[in-house]
Amino acid sequence: MILRTFNNQFMFEYSTVALERTQFVINFYRQRKLPITGSAFYNECIRLNIYQNNRAAAYKIKEDMDAGVLGDFKADIHTYVAIFNDVHASTREDLALLTTYYDEMLGRGIQPTDLVQKPLIRLARKIGEIPLVRALLESPGTAKLTDIHSTTAARLLSNKAQAYIAQYDLVGARTQLEELLLYHIPKDTRLLPSTQGYATGSSDIRIPYEFTRTRDAFFIYVRSLYESIIRVYIIRHRIREAHELLDDMRRTIYLPPSRMAYNWFIRYHAKRKNIHRLHEIHDMMLQDGVAPDEYAYTKFITACMYQPRPRRLRKLVDKAINDGKLPKTLGASFEPADGPDPAIDEAQDESAPRPSGLPEIPKHIAELTSVHDLVFHPEDCVRFYQSMFLEFDGRIKNSRDEQCLPNAHIINAVMCAYTMLERPSLVLREFIRYAYHQSRLYPHQPPPDIKANIVPVAHMFKMALDASDATDNQEQSQRIHTQMVRWGIRLPNST
């Protein structure tokens, strides 16, 4: 307490007398060999050496604390507060060094406080920048870091790039990324614990202290920076540049892209029915060892069979005409005589319901086989569905297999695909799969999935009834009607 009082007196008054008193107390303890009962004594010794601009001695005390030389005392938040309150720090190299300790503190699970963050901001002001982020943006401090500090440089440059991204400056973010790739890869090949979760698309990544110099830690920072830029490209519909950056990331770092990054691409292309792109992404994920999750397979499968709204359908046709896949004369006959109505929803279209149960196609293009093939891709849908069962180690021919439980959207799309392929027996198999597992999980009540997806589920029942009629399976038809009563399902045309 006495040491802390003298050190605080110097911090507010900058009186050398306070330092002399602190040194006297320390010498008194050492000469009398008085017992030290806490880490506060060593923390104040570190603070004193920092005030006297004797950083080497201060850092040596901290290292001895971590190594157990000084007893059972470990560095705590007060140790780092003493290190960060360096009144002599005035250069960008000092900022980089303090950032290294900041990174170390986060890796040890020590939460930063204002007593830690304010000295960093104060140093940023001293070197000519107001906020800390601006100091990280404008300072070339990482350029003088050696290769053994590559992980520290990765964290600094990642923070810089994140700030550029926040200011919608992708050029600046790409510049930080290119500078980071010039650093040597760390030689420590130890793998981080698999149980540790690491957020992507963010610079707030906390690596355990003992792994901060590893190759894994370096590439986690690099991957996070790559994916942050990719995400902004996708949001801005600059998909070509996003794909180029994804390819560059797969070539540059040995860590594969995260599942979240792949899902961004899947969502973008599924909405636009770019089926060939979805196949490419699916193959990339399998090559990189990134297993698609339920969200990814739902997008893969439903993208093949959903009918887009008129505006999106118009864009698909225009793109196919420009690519030479459709005749140019189709452009005039594609739209109704009174022109397109962007307010029309396919659910409100007055086209006659199709006996097969497939999604309705507007009357003015119902006879255009080429457009029909452009919208629906049943073979691709089935292919993705089979891949999903392989991924989850399930058996697609066994409708009661419990390894893979497709959701209502997947089953609805697959039943549509088999209906289009004129495979009524497989339509019934998929319906039985869904009904069996939902009844098994919720034997005494309607499944929650029914209420959340009432439209696709009712569509599934209609397709199942049509398939049972096509196979002349009256017994199965009766079971379907019984299940409809149990779950309270009413077909769209029923009264």
Image: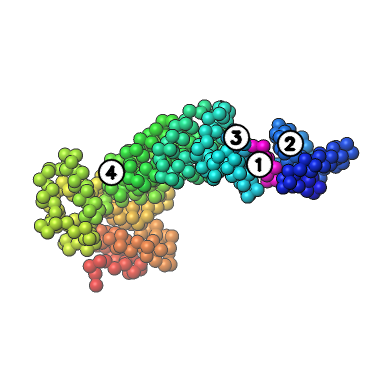
Between marks 2 and 3, how big is the CA–CA gap? 17 Å
In the rendered image, which residue does mark 1 sit on?
84
- 440 to the left or right of 195: left
* Residue plotted at (40% across, 40% down): 170
The residue tagged with tag 4: helix, strand or loop?
A: helix
- Magenta residues? 76-89
Image quadrant holding the C terminus, namely bottom left
Q: Secondary structure at mark 3?
A: loop
Q: Are the two marked residues, 2 and 4, in contact with CB atoms closer than 8 angstroms?
A: no
Q: Nearer the viewer, residue 342 or 407?
A: 342
Element assignment for label 2: loop
Badge 4 crowding class, 10 Å Cα cut-off, few under 14, some 14 to 19, many 20 or more, is many
Q: The disc labelled 3 sits on which kind of residue?
A: Thr
**Label ID, residue 91:** 3
Which numbered marker is on residue 158? none
Q: Nearer the viewer, mark 3 or mark 1?
A: 3
Residue 46 at x, y percent in the picture: 73, 39
| Pointers 1 and 4 in contact (C-beta within 8 Å) | no
> Dividing the picture into quarters, in which one does residue 85 lie?
top right
Can you tell which of label 1 and label 4 is closer to the viewer? 1
The amino acid sitting under disc 1 is Phe
Report x, y in % for residue 112: 62, 47
Mark sitting earlier along the chain (1/2): 2
Residue 252 falls left or right of residue 331: right
Residue sticking out furthest to the right: 32
Q: Residue sitting at 64 percent across and 37 percent down?
A: 89
